[in-house]
Image (cartoon, rainbow, N blue to C red):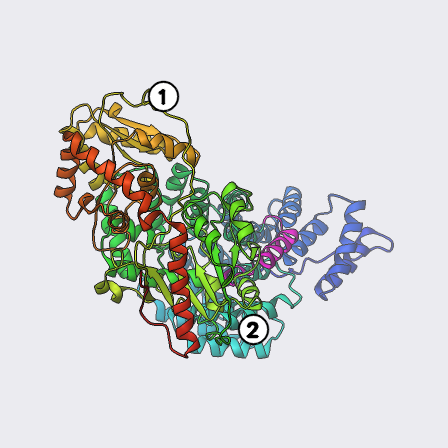
Amino acid sequence: MKNTRSRVPVPPLRPRPPAAGSLDVLYSQAVALHRAGRLADAKRIYETLLSRQPDHHGALYLMGTLALQGGGFADACRLLTRALALNPQHPASLANLAMAQSELGRYDDAIQNMERALQINGAIPNGSVNLAGILIQAGRHQDALNLLETLGSEQRNSTDFWTNLGLALDNQPGRKSEATAAFRQAVVLSPNSPKHKKNLAQHLQELGANEEAMALLDQLIVQSPDYAEAYLIKAKALQSLGQTHEAIALCMAASRLKITTPDVLASLSRALTLAGEYQHALRIAHQALELHPDHHPAHVAAGFVLRAMHSPDLALIHLNKALALKPGDDEVLFEKALCLNHLKNYSEAIETLNKIDPEKIDVARTILFNTKQHICDWEDFSKLESQVANDLMTRENIRACFVAITLFDDPAMGLLAAKKQIKDSTGGAHGRPPLAVPEKSEKIRIGYFSADFHEHATMYLISQVLSSHDQAHFDVHLFSYGPIESSPTIDRVKPKIKEFHYVKHLSDQAIADLSRSLRIDIAIDLKGHTTDSRMGIFPYRCAPIQVSYLGYPGTTASEFLDYVIADKIVLPPDQQKNFTEKVVYLPHCYQCNDSERAISSRSYSRHELGLPDEAFVFCCFNNTYKVIPSVFACWMRILSVTPGSVLWLYQSNEQAAENLRGHAAQHGIDPDRLVFAKHADIPEHLARIQAADLFLDTYPCNAHTTASDALWAGVPVLTRAGQSFASRVAASLLSTLELGELITHASGDYEALAIALAREPQRLRAIRDKLVRNRQTSPLFDGQRFARDLEKAYLAMMERAWAGLPPDLIEVSP
């Protein structure tokens, strides 16, 4: 944060001539020590004096000033308030109280007290300049500018005047060049002041003048090698340029300095968090809070790192405290909304996001849209959809991959979204050069990286493959940065792999270093741009070959991932141009499945599931964020011409169910024709879904695991295939099962086929019988066969690497 003003200096509060042995002697000694900079000695005498005379105004005032100088802002407020109770018209006490209150985010009180001080004594040193600084902190940049422009030439000789003028101008449209001139003037007036050089460097960095900013910061580090803020600002600049390793080195250098101010500690914590050094960042944030429990930036830093560590409940404690200290802080509101989303408190997240100015946080509108989708809140859907599309095209600091695949059937749009998100996901890292390929050996060491090695959709799909790798030729390692959970699925896998590494609390670099120490040959990222991803691991080069697979249905746009595993249906050859990774085509469906998943022996009646006994039951168990208005309108048209039919949906949350019932009524459909099913364990879900007649897929983001569930349970899936990877997943599943008759390519065809199958029970029965037959022999549900195909792909990757060839298109034969 740029400094907005200087603190009010200790004024020449003149003691009376001391009488020998009186308290005035102590007071005179303390004042002399205070002015000489011997603050600890002065504090000790002030404390002694106040223990003898608790209502000594001068001691209370100067003790409060001392607390202000030392960063003890809450103590300063308490002491200065006591001093003002004794002398309400003391301008210096009012001014210093205002400074302390502003540090605590109490801007209205601070402005009121500084204005009172200036009314009593307009000549308070730097008083008007400091008032302008508080106005800037409060977001009242125009008021600050108006005040500064009224000041005379004497106050314009102050470096703090020019700094605050720069800050005020910086927030005025079209006045950036004037702001630059003001920051430069502050440096001219105080060429040896680290603070003012730092402010200018930050400003230049924000303007994109990185070369000059870096030169200034280099000068500053040479001039003031103990000035930690210079290291941190340069680290931030290096991170924005993708020089992550150099940035981390500067953060570490700053952390070795003796830092005693909470401001700098908070900045260091933020920088360490961006570098993936979470444990270190959390320790530093706590150090800042020990120094100053009500320090706003320290609470923000603690919340920031705790959210990064996937502890949103703990992060919210600090973020709410930060908002209590500084209401309306857009950055903190955004962090809070992300935590609330993680906790599935979508209503409060939406309320929080609506308080944010979308012009200040590039990604705020995208996150708002995604959050509203989780509860099917479609108010202003078209308007917001258009704004999100525009943000994706025009803004740089935006994370919109999942919104892009949910809304847009456009691979080029998916690539654009991924290119913008990958910089945020990896800290913009250029990373290490590729690892040297080891000599050819009998065993290939495979590392799978994910947060989903627990009861999760990804684990349900891949568990049999992990258990089926040929242990004579492959050593399999799992690197888990998700929750610590013992579950039947992961417990079944662990005995069949080489080693399970729990790495959640390690930094990105430390995880990569562990992988390198284990000499992993191929690292497979199972997350991509999804929740709890750790894309920042891969710039550090976990392995000579790095691969994207399964978790994210699109390109990662990462220069550090060499291959993406797909098939020719989800990723047609003409769409390779929209993937930065080289494509590995598997011979059948790209999506692995587990043929050992148990289906409960329980036979559910429709009655106990809340379904009508004789009705035709359409179903969709996709997550609600995939259900967009156009899809829902299509479903309502289907219901309107199939009397007595019902739509059976997954209830991810009560609000979504309530909103969908309301949307049905708006389409003229009885809300009771929507039946909602809550979460069930997988064996029970696979048994109950057999009560459905036809699974209706979503578009443009298809069912993935939920489609496999339905097909494994013997329920036909009707899909609409588009152009994007995400819109073609169900088509790949169905093609592998030789059920191409359930694939459509337009909304009208999708509706017509759904209606026809509901009206022609014999036709649907034939399809269902075919599904039941084919699933027993199809490659789709043969996990061991899939493992062999995947191993062929891994071997082909290694063969190219051993031959000294770069990654290129690979097609695995059946």
* Residue 608: numbered disc: 1
On the rendered image, what quadrant is the C terminus found in?
bottom left
Question: Which residue type does callout 1 highlight?
Answer: Glu
Question: Looking at the image, is 754 positioned above or below residue 421?
Answer: above
* Residue 193: numbered disc: 2
- The Cα atoms of the two marked residues, 2 and 1, are separated by 76 Å
Magenta residues span 273-294
Is 529 placed left or right of 85 in the picture?
A: left
Residue 277 within the magenta-colored segment of the rendering? yes
Which residue shows up at 49% across the image and 64% down it? 473
Is 482 placed left or right of 738 in the picture?
A: right
Which residue shows up at 77% across the image and 50% down it? 47
Which residue shows up at 56% across the image and 73% down it? 193
> In the rendered image, is residue 551 in sight?
no
Q: Is mark 1 on a helix, strand or loop?
A: helix
Is 65 placed left or right of 457 in the picture?
A: right
